[in-house]
Amino acid sequence: MNGMINTNTERNERGLLPYPIILAANKGELEAMKVVVLHYRSYMTSLSMCKLRDEQGNTYWGIDEDTRERLRTKLMQSVLAFKI
């Protein structure tokens, strides 16, 4: 990666990921994969929101960690399997 991570993806989460990052992640480079996961982190978190219940029976909105982890895993698998 050697400095490729210093992109605007940290500042512009909704922007497109640069092609070199996608290509490096597709080849299995750890730092590039971290950038891809970070880019989609808030989206995966919003998809993981659900109604939960505490010990007293109160209902509240929270993050289902199992769902978020499954989404993260599926994203990583899809990036690695994508044919470029």
Image (cartoon, rainbow, N blue to C red):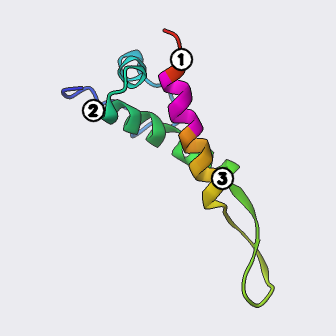
Q: Give the residue type at disc 1.
A: Phe
For label 1, the crowd category at 10 Å Cα-Cα, with few meaning under 14, some 14 to 19 and many 20 or more, is few
Q: Label 1 vs label 3: CA separation? A: 22 Å
> Which secondary structure class fits the magenta region best?
helix
Q: Quadrant of residue 53 in the image?
A: bottom right
Residue of label 1: 82
64 lies left or right of 29: right
Q: Separation of disc 2 and disc 1 at Cα?
A: 24 Å
Q: Is residue 32 left or right of residue 75?
A: left
* Residue in front for this viewpoint, 48 or 77: 77
- Of pointers 1 and 3, the one earlier in the residue sequence: 3
Q: Mark 3 points at which residue?
A: 67
Q: In this view, does 4 lie above or below 73?
A: above
Image position of 45 with respect to 82: above or below = below
Question: Which mark is nearer the camera, 2 or 3?
Answer: 3
Left or right of 42 in this view: 26 = left
Quarter of the figure that contains the N terminus: top left
Q: Counting other residues with Cα less than 10 Å from the Cα at mark 3, is it few (<14), some (14-19), or many (20 or more)?
A: some
Q: Tell me the SS state at disc 2.
A: loop
Residue 11, percent from left and from top: 40, 39
Which stretch appears magenta? Answer: 74-80
* Nearer to the camera, 59 or 30: 30
Q: Name the residue under label 2.
A: 6
Q: How far apart are marks 2 and 3 (CA)?
A: 30 Å
Residue 12 vs residue 20, the one in the foreground: 20
Identify the residue shown where x is 40% and y is 33%. 33
When the figure is inspected, residue 31 is found, relative to residue 50, above or below; the finding is above
Mark closer to the chain start, 2 or 1: 2
User: Residue 26, position in %: x, y?
Assistant: 43, 21
Mark 2 or 3, nearer chain start: 2
